[in-house]
Image: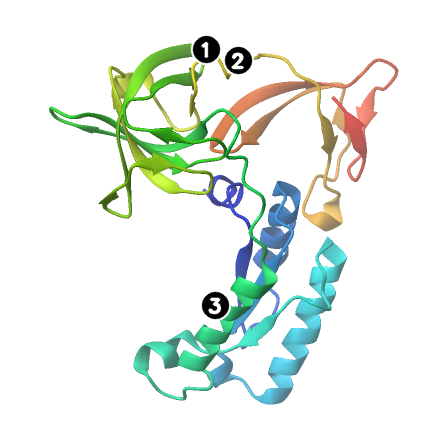
Amino acid sequence: NMITGSSQMDGAILVVAATDGVMPQTREHLLLAKQIGIEKIVVFMNKADAADNEMIELVELELRELLTQIGFDGEKTPIIPGSALCALEDREPKLGKEAVLKLLDAVDTYIPVPPRAADQPFLLPVEHVYSIPNKGTIVTGRVERGSAKKGDQIEVVGHNKINKGILGGLEMFHQTIEQALPGDQLGLLLKNVRKEDIRRGVFVGKPGSLKMHNKFDCQAYFLSKEEGGREEPIPKEFVLTMYCRTYDIGVKGIIPEGREMIMPGEDVTL
């Protein structure tokens, strides 16, 4: 679920408790975010009301060091101490409401809005699928590129199937909208497409713009033991799970001729 969500993000907020500091899962989440392609992160140091100033300073130093190790800009990354509980209970404004507003401002200023590919063919990776009686099939997801409007012809592509349909409507945050644009998180009503023919991971796109493949070449980096990866070498042929946008599937990896194994921490073409 974290891979599915973070693969569609423009940036992220990392929440770390000031009372605990960096935990094993903190490193794992940052590594995963970096591998997926997230470049900018803002940190909220929660429970600052339960920690003294010395502890807060130590945790901030620890966080900046970890961010730098993983490849983020540890010096410039905003780290905001605060307390979600204080904000909810409307007390200690500096750690509560003001800290949350400061966090939102940091997200707006530090995480840039990336350029959107509005002029390319429509593409939406499907996150969830629903069926509404007498209406049709609903899919939800984030528009990756292009635009679409009610009445457009679409194709649902994936899992060795291509199903054609019509876009019957668009809804975002319970409001009907006229057009889907890149970056929109929304629901699409699909006509002439059965729920049974769709599952998480398939793609909704402009007819003729998507092709399916069962083989491809890729450049892969295998995490070392210190990064949360393997200890043992990877053999010439191996099976792993591939995650791509909202899609996951078991794949067979084959090492090129001339090599018998891959060592953890290596970059290799497969």
Closer to the chain start, of discs 3 and 2, is: 3
Quadrant in the picture for residue 22: bottom right
Quarter placement of the C terminus: top right
Crowding around mark 2 (Cα neighbors within 10 Å: few <14, some 14 to 19, many 20+) is: few
Query: Which residue is labeled 1 in the image?
Result: 160
> How far apart, in angstroms, are the residues tagged by discs 3 and 1?
42 Å
Q: Horizontal placement of 160 versus 165: left or right?
A: right
The numbered dot on residue 77 is none
Closer to the chain start, of discs 1 and 2, is: 1
Query: Which residue is labeled 2 in the image?
Result: 212
Q: In the image, which is nearer the foreground, mark 3 or mark 1?
A: 3
Residue 55 placement (x, y as % from top left): 62, 83
Query: Which residue is labeled 3 in the image?
Result: 104
Asked which secondary structure carries label 2, the reply is: loop
Residue 208 placement (x, y as % from top left): 47, 12
Q: Horizontal placement of 116 versus 88: left or right?
A: right
Crowding around mark 3 (Cα neighbors within 10 Å: few <14, some 14 to 19, many 20+) is: few
Q: Residue at coordinates 62% horizontally, 54% vertically from top-left?
A: 30
* Residue 15 to residue 239: above or below: below
**In the rendered structure, which amino acid carries the disc numbered 2?**
Met
Q: Horizontal placement of 220 versus 36: left or right?
A: right
> How far apart, in angstroms, are the residues tagged by discs 1 and 2?
7 Å
Q: Residue at coordinates 43% horizontally, 14% vertically from top-left?
A: 207
Q: Residue at coordinates 60% horizontally, 72% vertically from top-left?
A: 79
Q: Is disc 3 in contact with disc 2, using a CB cutoff of under 8 Å?
A: no
Residue 242 placement (x, y as % from top left): 57, 28
Q: Is disc 1 in contact with disc 2, using a CB cutoff of under 8 Å?
A: yes
**In the rendered structure, which amino acid carries the disc numbered 1?**
Asn
Q: Residue at coordinates 64% horizontally, 75% vertically from top-left?
A: 59
> How far apart, in angstroms, are the residues tagged by discs 3 and 2?
40 Å
